[in-house]
Image: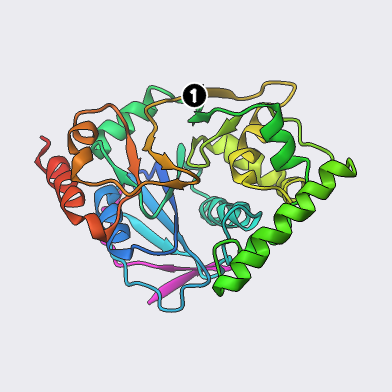
Amino acid sequence: MGKIIGGYVAEAVSKRKGGLVIKHAYLILAHNEFEVLQTLISLIDDPRNDIYVHIDRKVKDLPVLSVLQSQLCILEHRVDVRWGSVSQIKAEYKLFEAAVLEGKGYDRYHLISGTHLPLKSQDDMHDFFRKRTGQEVLNFLYTNAYEINMKLARYHFFLDYFQYGERWQKVMANFCWHVLLKLQYILRIQKDVPKVSIKANNWVSLTDRAVQHILRHKEDVLTKFRWSLCGDEFFVPYLLTGKNKLFDIVDARNLLYNDFQGSNARVLTSDDEALLLHSDYLFARKFSKSATPIVDRIVQHLRDKP
């Protein structure tokens, strides 16, 4: 059973307690590891939260997900998400739109992946963000003028096949991308660069005011970042760090523990247990069914907290 929310379908198995005010919206981008996704949902399942899930359109058999206390909405209209391309931004917009369409005016919108897990209880989470009322909580990443120019000022074609399709398609896509990128430097071809100096993890925690601002500038973002590489790490700072400095942006180093190996986040294992359970990080990623013991330890750690 589900209820239609505009262009979205909300699938829910929930028991709501009357009279409680929902304040936080968790917006989840998922494409695999659905056992981890259900664990994540169970850990944020709280009457103070609503949960919205976007599952990659490439997934044909949708998982059955359930909650007891939250409202769980699984988006019907989904994006075929491809690494590095503007499709990532489009999927994020789907989540923002779905949550705002509910009209509840959430105090906080957490954009996370389906392989995140919280490292703090929901009481701790709500307390942390209550102390940061009105602030946009991001996790800045190192960047420089060369990276911004390369990723945002050049045309990046063939990204749709970098990690998808047959092996020969991936090889050809990578080769053609390199050749065309090199030609752009030789011929001095570049497009207008969105005015941004900050790169941030695309997993953010934003106020309703910021999300409304992001939605108002959707067409501008999709136009400016259409041919960008990993534009999802730049478009939120681009919109929130304008000339008038309308938003109070915080670089929260403890927002997310995310250990990269090359361009991919490393799967966390039991070797990371001490760090994860005794740190001040709010979230960590990524987790996998292949490393179940650490997932079970985090669940036990949070369930044992008073």
Please say whether residue 7 is visible from this viewpoint: yes
Residue of label 1: 251
- Bin the neighbour count of mark 1 within 10 Å (Cα to Cα): few under 14, some 14-19, many 20 and up: few
Residue in the foreground of this view, choosing between 169 and 98: 169
Looking at the image, is 292 positioned above or below residue 171? Answer: above
Q: Is residue 5 left or right of residue 257?
A: right
Side (left or right) of 172 relative to 298: right
- Can you tell which quarter of the image residue 143 is in? top right
Residue 144 horizontal side relative to residue 261, left or right: right
Please identify the quadrant where the C terminus is shown. top left
Question: As rendered, which of 168 and 246 lies closer to the eye?
Answer: 168
* Image point (36%, 53%), residue name: 115
Looking at the picture, tell me which residue is in the foreground, 177 or 43.
177
Q: Which quadrant of the figure has residue 62?
A: bottom left
> Residue 96: x, y in percent?
55, 50
Is 229 one of the magenta-colored residues?
no
Instruction: Magenta stretch: give its range.
Output: 1-19
Between 185 and 224, which is closer to the camera in this rendering? 185
Examine the rendered structure and indicate whether residue 39 appears above or below residue 300: below
